[in-house]
Amino acid sequence: MMRLCVIPGDGIGQEVVPSAVRVLEKLLPGLEVTEAEAGWECFRRQGTSVPETTLQQMRECGAGLFGAVSSPSWQVEGYRSAILALRQSLQLNVNLRPVRSWPRISPRSDVDLLILRENSEGLYIGREYMQQSGNLAIAEAHISRQASEDIARRAVEVAVLRTSRRVTLVHKANVLPLTCGLFRDSCRRVLEEAGLRDIVDERLVDVAALQLIECPEEFDLLVTTNLFGDILSDLASHWSGGLGMAPSLNWGQGIALAEPVHGSAPDIAGTGKANPLAAILSSALLLRYHWHAGALADQLEGAVERLLAEISIAEMGGETTQRIEQELLLRL
Ligand code: GGG
């Protein structure tokens, strides 16, 4: 029995996640769905952004679909970003972010790459503090051999599944030889020991950013640290048609949380205009990588491809969320 913990979160998460769940239920009629709370609104109601019951539900289900969170951009006593708390508490240490061309909505037709972003450390451990009476702000970045080797082992799994022609390690070891150097060397060793020496390549992050714009078709699988992965995946999502088409999977050992890359979009929340495809495509990642149901993932992505080839999102009218879901269900 497959189980899914559904965590819509804030803003348009409340609209796109239920839409994705209905699509997933058509592919998996026996799916057992349980709903859980997390996010800023949850914090305002309950005093915590991720209640212990949500973590428990996630652990019991092993798979989840998260929508979005809108953390305030000022410090709030006792508040922790819900998505960072979920990733850390559930040890979802790798974030998988595919970028591919889709009919009509993508600016070019030959992009098919996947960014594996380390999800648990780097600058995102959130250790910031002030010194010199508030005149010096310091942020720590942690890179461990363990986390770097873990993401490299995931890269081996993904490279085999995708029959990758290249694995590119993205870092800034010329400026940060200790942190980025440890990441690069640990990843390289694992990849080479797995027999991938001939396809392992590396780029400085600034060069990678330029080349993701100039020649995205030359990349296949990119492996990088938390902050670089966050930025490069948003940048590269341009080739998929933007953030509305950017799915992701937070991936741990025996547990995974799918999540559209976009945020809670308060400006369109409640209008019915949110594009649910990033959430829907995130559930395809759960199918492919967590439930090992590659054929169902192909079926879902194939239906999205046909839908976009036949009707442009601009033609969908005002009720985009509902219309995309209906059109997709007809094509599954
Ligand atoms: N679905 C991803 C998402 O909600 N992104 C917005 C985000 O990460 N915001 C950071 C935060 O609000 O804590």
Image (cartoon, grey):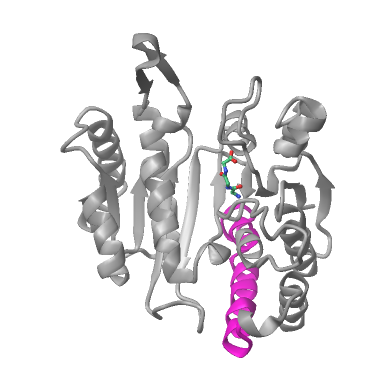
User: Can see residue 276?
Assistant: yes
Q: Is residue 152 left or right of residue 293?
A: left
Determine which quarter of the picture holds residue 275: bottom right
Q: Residue at x 82, y 31 (%)?
A: 45
Q: Quadrant of ligand 1?
A: top right
Image vertical order of residue 289 relative to residue 281, above or below: above
Q: Position of residue 304 (x, y in %)?
A: 62, 77
Nearest the camera: 142 or 68? 68
Q: Quadrant of the C terminus?
A: bottom right
Q: Residue at x 61, y 33 (%)?
A: 81
Nearest the camera: 22 or 227? 227
User: Can see residue 38?
Assistant: no
Q: Is residue 38 left or right of residue 118?
A: right
**Magenta run includes residue 26:** no
Which SS does the magenta portion mostly show? helix
**Magenta run includes residue 304:** yes
Q: Position of residue 227 (x, y in %)?
A: 39, 41
* Span highlighted in magenta in the image: 283-312
Q: Position of residue 192 (x, y in %)?
A: 25, 46
Q: Position of residue 14 (x, y in %)?
A: 76, 53
Q: Residue at x 66, y 20 (%)?
A: 78
